[in-house]
Amino acid sequence: MEDIERAELPQRDAEAAPPAPAYLVPGNVAWVDGEDFGMAEELYLTIVPDGRTVLLKDTARLIWHVAADGAVNVADEVAELVSIPVSEIEADVAGFLEDLTARGLLTPREG
């Protein structure tokens, strides 16, 4: 057992916090994901109490989930999940995220 070489893990700065997510879900947004109920991969978002319901499907649903789950770089994570080079989707993802924030369905994180 003396011949075993031990690899040392790099030291993490104890005070360094993980990067902040790029987006947050506002407290007044309610959502229901059809997949949670064995239904189609559809996401229903509503600004409560008197907002209109928005339906997101397929890639739109995926982008919202990635952002809502705290991704630091949404386009990078979506590209990895769908196995597409980020350069091919980055502009579309950015535009969609702008639309979601304009509708109040996501909030860009400050700083």
Image: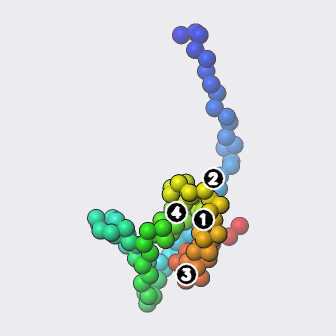
**Residue under label 3:** 104
Q: Earlier in the sequence, mark 1 or mark 3?
A: 1
Element under disc 2: loop
Q: Amino acid at mark 1?
A: Ile
- Foreground mark, 3 or 2, reads 3
Q: Which mark is residue 89?
A: 1
Mark 3 is surrounded, within 10 Å at the Cα level, by few (under 14), some (14 to 19) or many (20 or more) other residues, namely: some
Q: Amino acid at mark 3?
A: Gly
Q: Where does residue 85 sit, x and y in percent of width and height?
A: 60, 56
* Image position of 106 with respect to 11: above or below: below
- Foreground mark, 4 or 1, reads 1
Mark 4 is surrounded, within 10 Å at the Cα level, by few (under 14), some (14 to 19) or many (20 or more) other residues, namely: some
Element under disc 1: helix
**Answer yes or no: do the residues labelled 4 and 3 have beta carbons within 8 Å?**
no
Element under disc 3: loop
Q: Earlier in the sequence, mark 4 or mark 1?
A: 4
Q: Amino acid at mark 2?
A: Pro
**Residue under label 2:** 18
Q: Quadrant of residue 106?
A: bottom right
Q: Quadrant of residue 41?
A: bottom left
Q: Which mark is residue 66?
A: 4
